[in-house]
Image: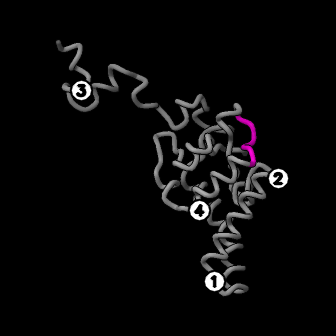
Amino acid sequence: MSRWTGSWLSGPGSARESDPAAEPGYRGERLGLPEAGLGSVAGTGRRFLALLIDWLPGALIGNFLTTNPAVSAMALFALLTVVSLAAFGRTPGHWVVGIKPTSLADAGERISFGHSVLRTLLLCLVIPPLVMDVDGRGLHDHVARTVMTIAR
């Protein structure tokens, strides 16, 4: 009987001891990515800094040149993100901090235009990026089947 109930009745930690796949050792391990260096999962700090760098131009233009700054900033951010992802595979903010979105569906290739639009729309909703898994992927990354990796 204990072999059936031991993993959940024995207390915290016992499931990890009996099943090494229950919790990864580092972010990206379940995805087959390296622990550190090129191709590893980008940290939250880099991702947030890239977001700020991408948001700033739209916020400035929206604040000084339009009558509805909040909507204008969001629209300009979305436009910059989709166009730069489609054209260059990453945004200016991604380039500055040395990260890039990588497709999990296409074995590390650039994300498609459709996935970049979907990922950007969910990013603009704010909540999906805040819901992260153990690999550091937000809900918007899950839906678009992407992961942010270190590019340099």
Q: Quadrant of residue 109?
A: top right
Give the residue displayed 34% in from the left and 26% down from the top. Answer: 16
Whether residue 16 is situated above or below residue 116 in the rendered picture = above
Q: Return the mark for residue 8.
A: 3
Read off the residue under disc 4.
Answer: 124
Name the residue beneath numbered marker 1.
68
Mark 3 crowdedness (10 Å alpha carbons): few <14, some 14-19, many ≥20? few
Q: Amino acid at mark 3?
A: Trp
- Labels 4 and 3: the sequence-earlier one: 3
**Residue shown at the point (23%, 13%) measured from the top left:** 3
Percent across and percent down for residue 151 are: 71, 44
Q: Earlier in the sequence, mark 2 or mark 4?
A: 2
Q: Is residue 16 left or right of residue 148?
A: left
**Which residues fall within the magenta stretch?**
108-113
Q: Quick one: SS at disc 1?
A: loop
Q: CA distance from mark 2 to mark 1?
A: 28 Å
Residue type marked 4: Cys
User: Mark 2–mark 4 contact, CB under 8 Å?
Assistant: no
Q: Disc 2 versus disc 4: distance between alpha carbons?
A: 20 Å
> Which comes before the other along the chain, label 2 or label 1?
1
Marks 4 and 1, how far apart in space?
17 Å
Residue highlighted by disc 2: 87
Q: Is residue 32 above or below residue 56?
A: above
Mark 2 residue element: helix
